[in-house]
Image (spheres, helix red, strand yellow):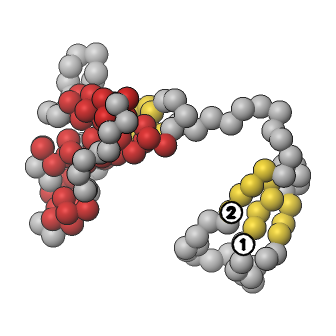
Amino acid sequence: MPQTTEPSSLLTTTSSAPAPESPPLFVPTLPLMRLTTPLPFAVRWSSCQRQDQNFALRQPNTERYLSHRMTPEERARWFEHNTYWALYTTDEYVWCYSERMNWWKDQTPPGLEAAIVSARQKIAEGQPLGFDIEPLIEAAGKR
């Protein structure tokens, strides 16, 4: 397995694929990264949830996005799924980002707050998500 060391000597990249002669347009897998020496600081992981994407608010041309073909209930379900797995995999925080809504003036899509509360409660109680998102995504993609 070829190995290359970053200039900082902190990370080692390993990959079983030979080095390409020119950069590929699509990289199907990422190389494995591992620390070769301890870092002098803590590494933290967080995740971003983009409500505009999940709730058909992304501009321009909202009809281009999958959420445009979903019902409001399906959008909330999709957001609960994403929030649950973001909380499941984060160290501590999941941050929410939107350009098309206003939390302070209670201008949020139907189901958004309930989706966050449900995902947080399931994580806090150690419960599984409780549903499979694939059928919902597949059905919306066919509309």
* Residue to which mark 2 is pinned: 32
Secondary structure, mark 2, is: strand
- Marks 2 & 1, CB-CB < 8 Å contact: yes
**Whole-percent x, y for residue 30 in the image:** 62, 65
**Quadrant of the drawing holding the C terminus:** bottom left
Q: Residue at x 55, y 73 (%)?
A: 28
Q: Is residue 136 left or right of residue 16?
A: left
User: Which residue is the extreme one toward the front?
Assistant: 126
**Whole-percent x, y for residue 109 in the image:** 18, 33
Q: Residue at x 45, y 33 (%)?
A: 94
Q: How would you rate the neighbour count of disc 2 (Cα within 10 Å): few for under 14, some for 14-19, many for 20 or more?
A: few
Q: Which of the labelled discs sits on residue 15, or is there none? A: 1
Say whether residue 55 is visible: yes
**Whole-percent x, y for residue 103 in the image:** 28, 21
CA separation in Å, label 2 and label 1: 7 Å
Q: Residue at x 27, y 28 (%)?
A: 117
**Quadrant of the drawing holding the N terminus:** bottom right
The quadrant in which residue 14 appears is bottom right
User: What amino acid type should be assigned to the residue bearing mark 1?
Assistant: Ser
First in sequence, mark 2 or 1: give its number. Answer: 1
**Whole-percent x, y for residue 138 in the image:** 21, 66
Q: Is residue 45 left or right of residue 104?
A: right
User: Which is nearer the eye, 94 or 59?
Assistant: 94
Q: Is residue 34 above or below residue 52?
A: below
Q: Residue at x 25, y 56 (%)?
A: 133
